[in-house]
Image (cartoon, grey):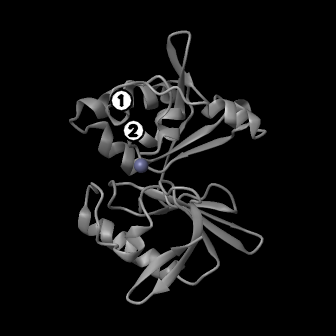
Amino acid sequence: MCPRCVGNDWPREITGGDPLATPFLQHFDEAGWSRDGVDAVVCTHLHVDHVGWNTMLENGKWVPTFPKARDLIGRQEYEFWRTYDDEAQRTMLGDSIKPIFDAGLVQLVEPDHVISPEIRLTPFIGRTPGHVSVMIESEDECAVITGDMTHHPCQLAHPDWMFGDSDPEAAVLTRLRPFAEWADQPILVIGTHFAAPAAGHVVRDAAAFRFAV
Ligand SMILES: [Zn+2]
């Protein structure tokens, strides 16, 4: 679970039915950011632990947490979940996604969308039908924010280990190709679900890989 992205005040199944009350926004302020200063938010996919902070509870109403941001959501990801027959998913769409649509903040994008000269999306389909990761290239340095194309460094050694992927076969291939591409390269891999330290490098290790931090 990635509780930072579940958001506060939701009685979600993933939090055991109890709403979270984390100091995420306080930490956000202390780090020198402001909610109004965020100009883009990327949803790598539309799972409950990745969309919660799209909105926040204010005077009993769910409002955009980042009111001046474009909210980038994959078109094929949204189209899949929009009609998905699941009560929990419908609830999530209603309170984490609909308010940002209503506020005119959502931009539905293709899986290889270029956000800026330095930041682009890249599709890693399998975890969900429209899952993307985020590639960052600047001044000869490169990093990737994984999203959920991998959940734990153990999948570097065992890319075939599953974690509830919507298309398991595609998810395994989705992991194998980039792991091979990133191995022994100066690419900082930032594992969205990895425990701290969550950033490191992929190193080839016998027939598979390992995570070096
Ligand atoms: Zn996740």
| Residue 199 percent coordinates (x, y) | 60, 63
Callout 1 crowding tier (Cα within 10 Å): few <14, some 14–19, many ≥20: some
Task: Note whether 169 is above or below 48 in the view shown.
Answer: below
Instruction: Name which residue type carries label 2.
Output: Val
SS at badge 1: loop
Judge by depth and name the residue closer to the eye, 184 or 83: 184
Residue placed at 33% from the left, 26% from the top?
17
Q: Which residue is mark 2?
A: 48
Q: Which residue is mark 1?
A: 12
Mark with earlier residue (1, 2): 1
Judge by depth and name the residue closer to the eye, 113 or 144: 144
Whether residue 108 sits left or right of residue 170 in the image: it is right
- Report the mark closest to the observer, 1 or 2: 1
| Residue 88 percent coordinates (x, y) | 28, 31
Residue placed at 41% from the left, 64% from the top?
124
Residue placed at 46% from the left, 76% from the top?
179
Instruction: Name which residue type carries label 1.
Output: Arg
> Which quadrant is the N terminus positioned in?
top left
> Image quadrant of residue 184?
bottom right
Callout 2 crowding tier (Cα within 10 Å): few <14, some 14–19, many ≥20: many
Q: Are marks 1 and 2 in contact (CB under 8 Å)?
A: yes
Whether residue 4 sits left or right of residue 161 in the image: it is right
> Image quadrant of residue 125?
bottom left
SS at badge 2: helix
Task: Note whether 40 is above or below 67 in the view shown.
Answer: below
Residue placed at 47% from the left, 28% from the top?
20
Disc 1 C-beta below 8 A from ligand 1: no
Q: Give the label on residue 4, or none.
A: none
